[in-house]
Amino acid sequence: MNKDILTLVNSLREGTTGKTCMGTGNYSFDIITRREYPNGFVVGKRNKYEEKIMTMEIGNICGNVMTMLPYLGVKTFPVAKLDVSPQGYQMKRDMKAYGADVRFVDNTLKGGTTILRCMHKLDDQGNPTMGHKGSTAGKPWTGMSARPCRKYLSSQNGEVETLVDSMDFTPDVFFFDVAQAGHRILAEKLREKGTLVYFEGDSDGHKIEDEKRRTAAKRAFLRCIEVSDVVKMSVELVEDLSFADDYQDKLFIQTLGAEGLRFKLGEGQWIKLDPIVNPDYKDYEGAGDWTSSTLIAALCSKGMLKVKDMTEQTVAEVLTMAQQMASYSVGFYGSKGLIHTDEDFKMQDNTLEMPHYTKKLMYLHGSASAGYSRTSMGILQYLPEDWQLLMPDCPVDAEECLQMLKELCEKEKPDLIIGSSQGGYYAQMLKGYKRICINPALEMSKDADVKLGSHYFVVNRQDGIQKYVITPEMLQGYCRLDAHQFDGITDFDRENCYGLFGDKDADWGYCKAIFAEHYNHIHTYPGGHKMEYDEIEKYLMPLVKELV
């Protein structure tokens, strides 16, 4: 590690002993990848590339701040509502591994987890750039706008009050990065107890086209500023800072990208700090989060936890520290790359106490998909809290997949197996278990997703791999399974393997007749190949509860 940075980190740690920060807002499961060009890169040409996975861990603004601060000596208490997907549990493990106290992190059926893929690549002119691609409950999206899988602290039903009442401490700092009512109320209550409130302003809504929504977003943004002590914004998201003149009791910070940053303390004027340039730049993704984390740690370390105790000189000093750390961080891939390269930093035990389940179900996904998909998230919405849903990612090789699933079933002994499309194909062959096959693709060797050649998964998988290849040998394996899939059916199977078919399924609807030749229970619903959430609730869940 750079000696100057090591000195900075050690000095912060000396002053942050016993300091605490609670935070809530945006969390995501980040898959950081880098494109490599084995044949070189030629401008104006389609260049062959290979995508290398670098890290897969918790990320996004609040997720990063809550896991960066422990590295700087500040104990963190993230508040998060995650789901029960493998990625949701991994995010909680990551928080714990970095040193966060996860007592306020919940994995529940009503929670949410967003997966974000960050791609380092070259643009058409050969310049380094970043691309973002993600999936929320199996719905692919690009950019940073679609977040239906994020679940925030609610302002309803006394949720904030219950949280505050359960706390046996008052944090030194409260961090939040989304202008939600629940976050604002929590900030207000903690500020009344003496906590320094740090708001990372995500947006004032000025880019929203609809006037009513734009006005509502601006109002929510300003209400969050009112209950905050330190407000940090980027020039990309918040351009007009004229509102800052209306407040004399706050520290405002605006990051300016390559131009550095500027700040305004109380009644003072805006003061600009020049950037600290890192010539070994690799990845800017976590720079802003390191700025916030280092600033919070420096404020704790120097006893500047009240705006009245700050001066323009001391603010400039701690912001320079933050700039130094942020500049150093861009020399590594991944938002927390610098932590990964620090051999002296030891990750903590990340063992979680898992809930007790009374029933265990298994969901098998369709082709080119993953266990964490839109259908499995739909099923989770309607399961009792004490029912577990296993969601394995199925291997592409059919015979390998069937063997893996047989071994998994032998180990887990599920009370019910639910398979959709290709998953229904496999579920039908897992004889001896209760099963529901939703629009099973019973002639998988004819499926477009298993044709010879290269294909892409449509959602993010646990291993982060996006591309797969079907070889002649693998296709022959599908043909063999097609030919023998109904071998060994027993009376138990005929009575306990149910078929659920959409009457508008144009893909595999004809398989209903094939299925009916071997099994006794056929059900239909008015829909297509993929079940919508309301169809899952109305037609699938009654069958699930009947069989379980």
Image (cartoon, rainbow, N blue to C red):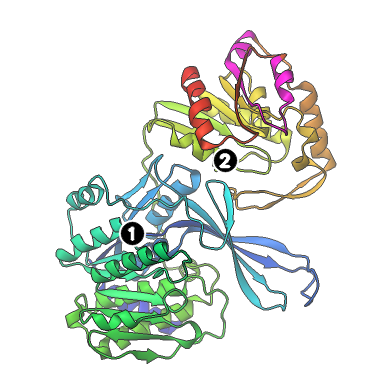
Quadrant in which residue 21 is drawn: bottom left
N-terminal-most mark, 1 or 2: 1
Q: Is mark 1 on a helix, strand or loop?
A: loop
Q: Position of residue 343 (x, y in %)?
A: 46, 68
Q: Give, as a single range, the part of the protein colored magenta.
A: 491-516
Disc 1 to disc 2, C-alpha distance: 30 Å
Q: Where is residue 447 in the image (x, y as percent from the top left)?
A: 77, 37
Quadrant in which residue 499 is drawn: top right
Q: Residues within 10 Å of mark 1 (few under 14, many from 20)?
A: some
Q: Which residue is drawn at 36% across and 81% down?
A: 241
433 to the left or right of 85: right
Q: Which residue is drawn at 81% across and 44% down?
A: 471
Q: Where is residue 376 in the image (x, y as percent from the top left)?
A: 53, 37
Q: Where is residue 140 in the image (x, y as percent from the top left)?
A: 59, 52
Give the labeled residue for mark 2.
371
520 to the left or right of 299: right
Q: Residue at x 30, y 58 (%)?
A: 181
Is residue 511 within the magenta segment?
yes
15, above or below 439, in the image: below
- Point out the frontmost of discs 1 and 2: 1
294 and 79: which is toward the camera: 79
Q: Residue furthest front?
A: 211
Determine if residue 130 is in view. yes
487 to the left or right of 207: right
Is residue 49 within the magenta segment?
no
Q: What residue type is labelled 1?
A: Gln
Q: Which amino acid does label 2 sit on?
A: Gly
Give the labeled residue for mark 1.
180
Q: Residue furthest right?
A: 472
